[in-house]
Image: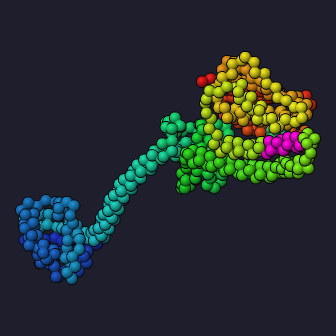
Amino acid sequence: MYSSMNELFEIAFNSASEGLVVVDSSSEIILVNKRLLELFGYQKEELIGQRIEKLVPMPKRSSHVGYRDQYMDNPHSRPMGKTGMYLEGERKDGVVFPIEVSLNYFQMNDSRYVMGLVTDITKRVEMELELKKAQDNLEKLNEELETLVVKRTRALEESQVLYQSIASNFPDGVINVVDQNMVCIFVDGMGLEKQGLKKSELKGKIYLDRFNDQTKLILENAFKRVVNGESQICFIENADQYYEVHFVSIPSSSRQRKRYLVVERNVTKQKLIEIEQAKALQKEKELGEMKSRFVSMASHEFRTPLSAILSSSSLIEKYDKTEQQENRLKHTSRIKSSVGNLTDILNDFLSFEKLNENKVEVSHEKLNMCELVQYAVEELESHRKNNQRIEFIKGEKPCVIYSDAKILKNVLLNLLSNGLKYSGNEGVVNVDFEISNGTLFLSVADNGIGIPDKDQKHLFERFHRAENVSNIQGTGLGLNIVKKYTELLGGKISFESELDKGTTFYIEIPTNE
Ligand code: ADP
């Protein structure tokens, strides 16, 4: 029984997966199992009777002696070594490897023995080391990541501040960011204040809401095209201001909702300059066209009076007898009338040129209307045909007004000469005026050919001549000039006319000092 117990004990002792070593009180090895021999690479004989330090790495042997003496004095069952640290064993071939040792003691035959249970923890330590390395790496990565995040956040904050200040200082305009439904996500810019708009009132609202229907349509169409992937620029007018609006799609990841940048730039100044330039160009073009039209018309109109002057002067030469005085007078009167026509054309041209170049200066002087009418009537002496006459009843009425005499005389000459020109040989032109309530009411009436209805609404347009005057000389500029002159004096012009009965022109201008 005893021997079979012994055998059993030996089998158990040797088949244990941990190394077992038993030392006596002087720390001499008295028993080792198979596993321990495998772990340390010794033969049994090489260890039995040896000090336990043989299994301890060389540099730690001396300190080990101290520890094990302490343990022998006060033995108890415990794991060996400090918590959290592993021990090391030294193999026969000098290789040091990590071990875990748990100590137990027992008394036998008054002697004290200590049994050490040795586990090779190379794998565990390796794994721990690997784990530690992995942890260290992870920590390092974490640290790097954190630094990166801090850096990025700072950069982001800086760029956000930068973008924000760019946006809020965007001169003369507004920067908007809208989503695919045109809901305003972001809005800023110096143009907001100028338009009386507040960021807080626009954010979250539909971008188009602050525009009128026509502008909405333009912006909406541009936005549709941007959504389809094209960048767009359109021009809008809002509250008397002109804007250039740029639409751009903002690149985003597939998870982010689509956003669009809408930048409104106030281009009113440039636009007004453009409009002015276009107007000036148009005016210049018109003026050029008018001048060339005038020159061709004037040269045509010059031909008739000039040939009349030529033929009359040749005929006068032939009337050399005293009794032919009547014939001579007839031709001198034709010459005078032709010269009058030429003067009219030249005067029209000069006035027209001055008016179009804004070179007419209006003076404000005291003048006598009665005298002015009389001068004009006298000046038109040469324009009268046969029995034509101009009637002016001076009467006792007040005559003094404050206005521009030269301009008024020009107006009168134009209206009176038309009255004569468009009346028959027996025509009578009546000129009259009245001053009341600070206004001069002037009228020039004739009993001439009148103006066809369909021409009446075009009468003051330059170069317009009625259809019933094709055989009467004229430029079609006189009435246009008269209208402009009247308006320069702060007044207005109107007329009444009936075909073959006659025409009356009415002028009203302020007379006050
Ligand atoms: P012009 O007499 O040189 O043709 P105006 O500008 O003075 O040019 O007149 C424009 C047109 O108005 C004339 O061609 C003529 O058809 C019409 N008109 C002007 N005054 C009269 C008038 N007193 N009687 C009839 N037609 C007139």
| 43 up-or-down from 393: above or below | below
- Which span is picked out in magenta? 327-342
402 and 157: which one is in front?
402
> Which residue in the rendered view is the most extreme toward the front?
322
Query: Was residue 502 drawn as part of the magenta stretch in this picture?
Result: no
Q: Position of residue 401 (x, y in %)?
A: 65, 24
Q: Is residue 18 visible?
A: no
The answer to whether 390 appears left or right of 1 in the picture is right
* Quarter of the rendered image showing ligand 1: top right
The answer to whether 476 appears left or right of 240 in the picture is right
Q: Residue at x 51, y 41 (%)?
A: 191
Q: Residue at x 16, y 60 (%)?
A: 77
Q: Residue at x 12, y 78 (%)?
A: 50
Q: How did the renderer colour the structure?
A: rainbow
| 466 up-or-down from 298: above or below | above
Query: Was residue 328 drawn as part of the magenta stretch in this picture?
Result: yes
494 and 279: which one is in front?
494
Q: Position of residue 483 (x, y in %)?
A: 73, 34
480 and 279: which one is in front?
480
